[in-house]
Amino acid sequence: GDVATGTELAVVGAGPGGYVAAIRAAQLGVDTTLIEKDELGGTCLNVGCIPSKALIHATNVGYEADTAEEMGIHADVKVDMEQMVDWKDGVVDQLTSGVEKLCKANGVNIVHGRAEFAGENRLRVAHGGEGQGSETIEFEQCVVATGSRPIEIPGFAYDDDPVLDSTQLLALEQVPRSLVVVGGGYIGMELSTILAKMGCDVTVVEMMDDILPGYEEDVKRVVRKRAEELGVDFYFGQAAKGWERADDAGIVVTTENEDGEESTFDAEKAFVAVGRQPVLDTLNLDAAGLEPNEQGRLETDHTGETNVDGIFAIGDVAPGPQLAHKASKEGQVVAEVVAGEPAAMDYQAVPAAVFTDPEIATVGLTQAEAEEEGFTPAVGKFPFSASGRALTTNDHEGFVRIVADGDSGFILGAQIVGPEASELIAELGLAVEMGATLEDIAATIHTHPTLSEGVMEAAEHALGHAIHTL
Ligand code: FAD
């Protein structure tokens, strides 16, 4: 039957946006209901960030042991994929049950079911399974945090067995002999890298003329070169058109270049990673007076509020980069706004990381962006080949680059490609957020021998007095 309940705040979707919003709101004394149709933790914990990083790490443990002859390590590595996937699933379970405990401990009311709007102040939630009924939840304010799903392109339906999306790829219990990866974005590149390390013959076909759109050429080059060394083949300017079964239980993927010339690629499976689209079509947005913009997202103001009073949107359904930490920060901000606190989003220092080999991490402005904004940037660079620490780990490709305002020395941004880039970027995120200068970073004593010394050296380089680089 239909049960009616009321709540001050309804949060739809329990990914890193929604569950963080719910916990923060409850902490601030708001009566909060969190509605989730699947598992708590959303894409990030269940089929995104966490499982991908677990598999990347596990693969690297094996791969590094297997390729350390130079260091006198002669290992005979055997990979049990089924066990690796079990271990990864265990990590995911631990984190999702942690989210549930945190929600409960903070007094968040969790409702399992699929929500849709039934009015400006009302959601209808269908509980899973037959005969489990539905309930109507009246809310004073609402946060839409329903995330995103993989985009499906014509000719490549995900329910056809040899065609995989990232969720299906992360659940494979056997490494395919060969794989055509459609799309050289960050998800395609992260997973291509580990599959190549596991012995899969990987071919990336990309419509644009390079991998990783949005990143600078010298940053991408390091990752592309390493991927090629691992045996990944790249074909650019190729739009995937369709696939057919081949005689040998494999498939043939057809692509087309801009002149309409076709090429074919043989493989066991195809992995399509061409981006993710917001999940808004199932929400009956009309009923609440909401409408997605041309990019299919819900426009928001600096507090995360949509054009409808009291309805907020965060994470992958809102504008901006589709990243878990961006979703979570927006979740905190809207919770504070809902609770009546003064809060607003600040997008100056949203870091982004790509967990390829080596990693890429960026924050703030590039040199070109700084110039466009009218700065005369001071730029410093430090190559990891000059880092003692990088040499001791036998992992010394790449560099740290810092972009600062040439007049004031304020750090505007940074780009790192190299070992532990995803960790190293944190210091530079803090620098951008707090308005630190090159002098601040250069004056900070960094532990020796660590990769973080590279950040200090890049700042010194920008100031014209680097010690370990010319
Ligand atoms: P989601 O995490 O997508 O959560 C939305 C939730 O809403 C889901 O649980 C969904 O079931 C639920 N929902 C949807 N509709 C309804 C409904 N009608 N009723 C009830 N519930 C509903 N980001 C990073 O920052 N770092 C990474 O390393 C990274 N790696 C990634 C790797 C992969 C393979 C993928 C796919 C993504 C990765 N991402 C990464 C992106 C990251 O996962 C997303 O940006 C993030 O999860 C977005 O959070 P969200 O809260 O907006 O939505």
Image (cartoon, rainbow, N blue to C red):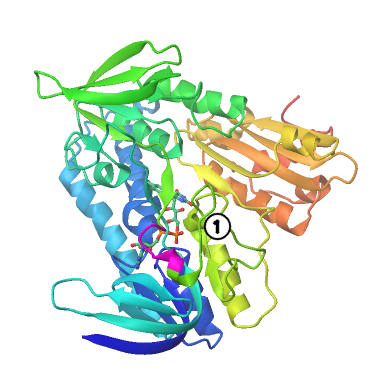
Q: Residue at x 67, y 64 (%)?
A: 302
Q: Residue at x 48, y 57 (%)?
A: 317
The boundaries of the magenta stretch are: 280-286
Q: Is residue 6 left or right of residue 169?
A: right
Image quadrant assignment for residue 338: bottom right
Q: Is residue 244 left or right of residue 33?
A: left
Task: Find residue 94 and report its horizontal and vertical position in percent.
Answer: 30, 65
Dot 1 amino acid type: Lys
Q: Residue at x 20, y 53 (%)?
A: 86
Q: Is residue 194 left or right of residue 408?
A: left
Task: Find residue 238 and report its horizontal and vertical position in percent.
Answer: 40, 20
Q: Is residue 418 left or right of residue 413?
A: left
Task: Find residue 69 and report its horizontal and vertical position in percent.
Answer: 34, 25
Main SS of the magenta segment? loop
Ligand 1 falls in quadrant: bottom left
Q: Looking at the image, which is closer to me, 345 or 12?
A: 12
Q: Which residue is mark 1?
A: 326
Task: Find residue 461 and report its horizontal and vertical position in percent.
Answer: 78, 33
Some atom of ligand 1 lies within 8 Å of the CB belonging to the residue at label 1: yes
Which quarter of the figure is the C terminus placed in? top right
Residue 81 vertical position relative to residue 329 in the rendered view, above or below: above
